[in-house]
Image (cartoon, rainbow, N blue to C red):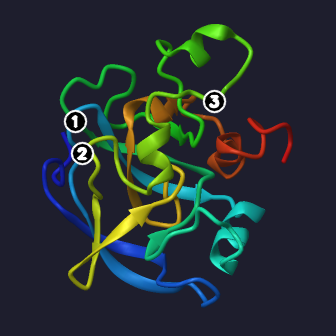
Amino acid sequence: MSATAGKTITCKAAVAWEAGKPLSIEDIEVAPPKAHEVRIEIYYTGVCHTDAYTLSGKDPEGAFPIVLGHEGAGIVESVGEGVTNVKPGDHVVALYTPECKECKFCKSGKTNLCGKIRATQGKGVMPDGTSRFKCKGKDLLHFMGTSTFSQYTVVADISVVAVQQDAPMDRTCLLGCGITTGYG
């Protein structure tokens, strides 16, 4: 078990405080994962046009302050109660397209747009309606359920997949969006 499991971690993150302004590197607090959540130490992240679009203020669903990023690979630092698909030490990819395997969309075989956490993910919060990020006493929003522009992030357990330990993270990070959306 990690020495930080169950504790709040302070780390660096690129925070978007408001639309149209540059990202700001800040010290943020990342709370431990709750039930069915996973905290990941991010080693590599991609930058997608969606991050820039949201930061520009043109995204009608964009909300601030937020930790952007939705293509990331790293190592599981800790897991919340009930997590069975990954464990601390696993190499993983954060997925903005979760897969619960239970909703009508996951069962259809025709789409990768799981509906289980779509409502809260779109509001920038975890499935329980709260944030795991704080900076300067303020809650920060989560981006697309992943927020990979942080050294540590917390995702729902249906928003993460384990990969082989020898898979290069500088490439596997792209699986989170660039590959799942049809090569960007």
Q: Earlier in the sequence, mark 1 or mark 3?
A: 1
Dividing the picture into quadrants, the one containing residue 134 is bottom left
Q: Residue furthest toward the bottom?
A: 21
Q: Residues within 10 Å of mark 3 (few under 14, many from 20)?
A: some
Asked whether residue 48 is in view, the answer is no
In the foreground, 55 or 79:
55
Q: Looking at the image, is mark 3 or mark 2 nearer the viewer?
A: 3
Q: Secondary structure at mark 3?
A: loop
The answer for how far apart the CA atoms under marks 2 and 1 are is 5 Å
Check disc 3 and give the amino acid type: Leu
The answer for how far apart the CA atoms under marks 1 and 3 are is 24 Å
Examine the rendered structure and indicate whether residue 172 appears above or below residue 42: above
Taking the image as shown, residue 53 lies to the left or right of residue 141, namely right
Pick the quarter of the image with the N terminus.
Answer: top left
Q: Give percent across and percent down for residue 144.
A: 54, 51
Examine the rendered structure and indicate whether residue 154 appears above or below residue 49: above
Q: Residues within 10 Å of mark 1 (few under 14, many from 20)?
A: some
> Residue at the spot x=28%, y=58% of the render?
132
Q: Residues within 10 Å of mark 2 (few under 14, many from 20)?
A: many
Q: Earlier in the sequence, mark 3 or mark 2?
A: 2
Asked whether residue 138 is in view, the answer is yes
Contact (Cβ within 8 Å) of mark 2 with mark 1: yes
Taking the image as shown, residue 68 lies to the left or right of residue 179, namely left
Check disc 2 and give the amino acid type: Pro
Check disc 1 and give the amino acid type: Gly
Q: Secondary structure at mark 2?
A: loop
Q: Give percent across and percent down for residue 174.
A: 71, 47
Q: Give percent across and percent down for residue 2.
A: 21, 46
> Residue at the spot x=47%, y=78% of the render?
15
Task: Check disc 1 and report the residue beneath it.
Answer: 80
Task: Check disc 2 and report the residue beneath it.
Answer: 33
